[in-house]
Image (cartoon, grey):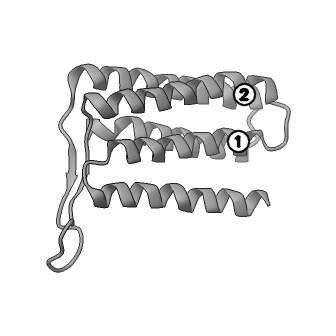
């Protein structure tokens, strides 16, 4: 479960960003909470690179006998570097978004960045073809949803 902790933390941060915007909290406070949570996810990813946690394996979640039925999300030296770069870029984007706090679509931008980075981390952590397809489908569905709302 520790393997997907940064993803869960980013998803929680995105959800919390939307909820805080719905209760009309000040944009600066929302930005601060989001920056703290993304920095925590960055630090957790750094720790994961050192300790190499056990992979998350979800098996037999489809009925019937099928090939490629297990979802595997794991960290190893090659994909950790890419995942660390993704979360570092996210943290830099969130820190640089502080100058756009007064824009009307600020919450959409920052939560969209959090969601896309979380799904990108899942795609990087994919240890089986099925888990990669599921993660990539989540990215596509989210992009379709964002584009349909913005257009």
Horizontal side of 80 relative to 119 (left or right) equals: left
Q: Residue at x 61, y 56 (%)?
A: 143
Q: Residue furthest bottom?
A: 64
Q: Position of residue 9 (x, y in %)?
A: 44, 37
Q: Nearer the viewer, residue 137 or 26?
A: 137
Q: Is residue 118 above or below residue 77?
A: below
Quadrant (top left, top right, bottom left, bottom right) of the C terminus: bottom right
Q: Is residue 59 above or below residue 98?
A: below
Q: Residue at x 44, y 28 (%)?
A: 41
Q: Residue at x 52, y 28 (%)?
A: 38
Q: Quadrant of residue 52?
A: top left
Question: What numbered label is drawn on residue 109?
Answer: 1
Horizontal side of 83 relative to 97 (left or right) equals: left
Tell me if label 2 and label 1 are in contact, CB under 8 Å. yes
Horizontal side of 148 relative to 16 (left or right) equals: right
Q: Is residue 43 above or below residue 63?
A: above
Residue at mark 2 to residue at mark 1: CA–CA distance = 9 Å
Label whose residue precedes the other's in the sequence (2 or 1): 2
Residue placed under numbered mark 2 in the picture: 97
């Amino acid at each position: 479960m520790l393997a997907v902790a940064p993803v869960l933390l980013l998803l929680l941060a995105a959800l919390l960003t939307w909820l805080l915007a719905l209760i009309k909290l000040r944009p600066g406070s929302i930005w601060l909470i989001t920056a703290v949570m993304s920095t925590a996810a960055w630090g957790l990813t750094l720790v994961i690179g050192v300790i190499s946690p056990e992979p998350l394996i979800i098996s037999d979640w489809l009925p019937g006998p099928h090939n490629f039925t297990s979802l595997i999300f794991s960290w190893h030296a090659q994909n950790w570097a890419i995942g660390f770069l993704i979360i570092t870029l996210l943290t830099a984007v969130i820190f640089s978004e502080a100058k756009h706090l007064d824009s009307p679509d600020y919450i959409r931008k920052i939560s969209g960045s959090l969601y896309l980075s979380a799904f990108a981390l899942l795609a990087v952590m994919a240890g089986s073809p099925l888990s990669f397809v599921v993660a990539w489908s989540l990215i596509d569905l989210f992009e379709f949803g964002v584009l349909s709302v913005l257009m």
